Image (cartoon, rainbow, N blue to C red):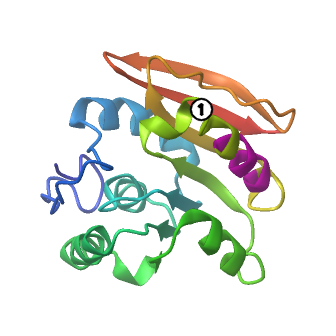
């Protein structure tokens, strides 16, 4: 796993083996971020279920102004902080070692709406019955965490619906990569 492009290009990232985390392949990351390039300069990014930070670090490397990372697993957070130091991007990052719900509660009063949310939950959360909680989380993101016109980038498996039961986000693009799928939604 490495940074694909930008100021930290080709820097390898530390990885933590865990049943709840999986790296996005370089091929998928390249395709995704090439499509996001017009939105990245000076963007405020929120990386939820960040793991070791591969997606948020890619956004920072490609010109995002700041990324807030949210990850609850302590070993992943340690690797994430190491990766930020290694890529020299720590000064443009904030890390919350919390579950997503708690972090969003803490952030509510502190942060302004972001331009891009990188949303990479464990694939099992996209399936019933956990899907209900994921739908509620997306509603919460639409309620003040992401600016109007901002993007929600949802990484999921190809058996999971990419859209959500909300009028606050519209699907603008879906890309398939074998067993992986990335759906990009726009905040309305």
Task: Name the residue that disc number 1 marks.
Answer: 184
Residue lying farthest to the front in this orientation:
129
Q: Quadrant of the C terminus?
A: top right
The residue under the point 52% across, 22% down is 160
Near-viewer residue (131 or 105)? 131
* Residue at x-position 67% and y-position 80%: 106
Residue 42 visible from this viewpoint? no
Residue 185 sits in quarter: top right
Percent coordinates x, y for residue 151 in the rendering = 65, 43
User: In the rendering, at what x and y percent does residue 75 appear?
Assistant: 25, 72
**Residue 123 as seen in the image, left or right of residue 108:** left
Q: Is residue 13 magenta?
A: no
Up the image or down, 50 lies above or below 35; here it is below
Q: Which region shows up in magenta?
A: 134-141
Secondary structure beneath dot 1 equals strand
Q: Nearer the viewer, residue 132 or 32?
A: 132
Magenta span: predominant SS is: helix
Side (left or right) of 187 relative to 160:
right
Q: Please say if 48 is above or below 34.
A: below
Residue 102, compared with residue 38, is above or below; it is below
In x, y percent, where is residue 124? 45, 36
**Crowding at mark 1 (Cα within 10 Å: few <14, some 14-19, many 20+):** many
Q: Position of residue 153 (x, y in %)?
A: 55, 40
Kindly identify the residue that appears in the image at 17 percent across and 60 percent down. Answer: 13
Q: Nearer the viewer, residue 77 or 45?
A: 77
């Amino acid at each position: 796993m490495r940074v694909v492009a930008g100021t930290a290009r080709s820097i390898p990232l530390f990885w933590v083996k865990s049943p709840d985390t999986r790296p996005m392949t370089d091929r998928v990351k390249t395709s995704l971020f090439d499509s996001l390039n017009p939105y990245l300069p000076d963007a405020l990014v929120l990386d939820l279920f960040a793991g070791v930070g591969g997606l948020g670090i890619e956004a920072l490397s490609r010109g995002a102004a700041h990324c807030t990372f949210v990850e609850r697993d302590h070993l992943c957070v340690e690797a994430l902080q190491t990766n930020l130091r290694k890529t020299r991007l720590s000064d443009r990052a904030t890390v919350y070692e919390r579950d997503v719900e708690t972090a969003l509660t803490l952030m509510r009063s502190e942060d302004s709406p972001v331009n891009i949310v990188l949303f990479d939950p464990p694939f099992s959360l996209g399936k019933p019955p956990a899907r209900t909680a994921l739908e509620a989380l997306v509603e919460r993101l639409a309620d003040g965490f992401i600016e109007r016109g901002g993007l929600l980038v949802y990484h999921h498996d190809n058996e999971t619906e990419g859209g959500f039961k909300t009028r606050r986000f519209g699907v603008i693009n879906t890309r398939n990569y074998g067993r992986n799928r990335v759906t990009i939604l726009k905040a309305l």
